[in-house]
Amino acid sequence: MALVQSTSPNCFAGAIEGIPLVKSASGDMLTKPFLDVCRIILPVLDKFGAAMAMVKSDIGGNITRLETRYKEDPSAFYLLHDIVRREISEKKAKNSNSCANGLLWLTRAMDFLVALFGNLLDHVDWTISHAATEAYNVTLKKWHGWIASSAFTVALKLAPERTKFMSVLGDGDLDSDIKNFVSAFSPLLQENHDFLKSFGLDDMKAS
């Protein structure tokens, strides 16, 4: 089921509408609804300007990788984790261009965004750069090599001023929508981590 972002006052409200659709009746993660939620959140990165260009590119690329695989056989890959199970059976899951790797990095990037917006809610005196740096330190940093980490650290210094940034995120009850998004989406991300970890696929690092 496609989600229409334009009907919501902000992207967080749109994502909240989509999150209940992510799970099947039996509790399995559905491929397209999960990717739809990630895609709905993606435009918020444009509000950061150059500071988040690398993150947006990474997220977009991994959504496309998983979506391309799903479209090859929607009935076989209706469930998100079945894409990874197929790669495990084919002994391809640990390849750098695998969907397992794509799901891992997509989940990690979403961890970063959840932590970032959680920081902005919890620390009203923090700058965007401070909130983003703290989020990076507890999510992505340990998985990045020196080059990626250095590039990310420099990029975060380009983050916009907080008041201006928050003012362009959209309308509605923004704080409430962000809080509800963080609360509802975090368990889905953890479920991805738990699934990947059960197959030894949750510790792959960037070069």
Image (spheres, rainbow, N blue to C red):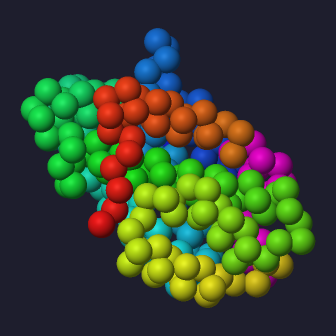
Chain part drawn in magenta:
164-181
Residue 196 place in picture, x, y as percent: 37, 34
Residue 64 vertical placement versus 99 (above, below): below
Residue 31 place in picture, x, y as percent: 37, 35
Residue 38 place in picture, x, y as percent: 49, 51
Examine the structure image and report whether residue 158 is included in the region drawn in magenta: no
Q: Is residue 170 visible?
A: yes
Residue 21 vertical placement versus 171 (above, below): above
Examine the structure image and report whether residue 171 is included in the region drawn in magenta: yes
Q: Nearer the viewer, residue 125 or 94?
A: 94
Residue 57 place in picture, x, y as percent: 39, 70
**Quadrant where the N terminus is found in the figure:** top left
Q: Is residue 1 visible?
A: no
Q: Which residue, as the protein is rendered here, is positioned at the far left?
A: 90
Give the residue at x 19% y 31%: 88
What's the magenta bit mostly, secondary-structure-wise? Answer: helix
Give the residue at x 56% y 51%: 111
Tell me which corner region of the image, top left, top right, bottom left or bottom right, holds residue 82.
Answer: top left
Q: Is residue 170 left or right of residue 29?
A: right
Tell me which corner region of the image, top left, top right, bottom left or bottom right, holds residue 133.
Answer: bottom right
**Quadrant where the C terminus is found in the figure:** bottom left
Give the residue at x 47% y 68%: 55
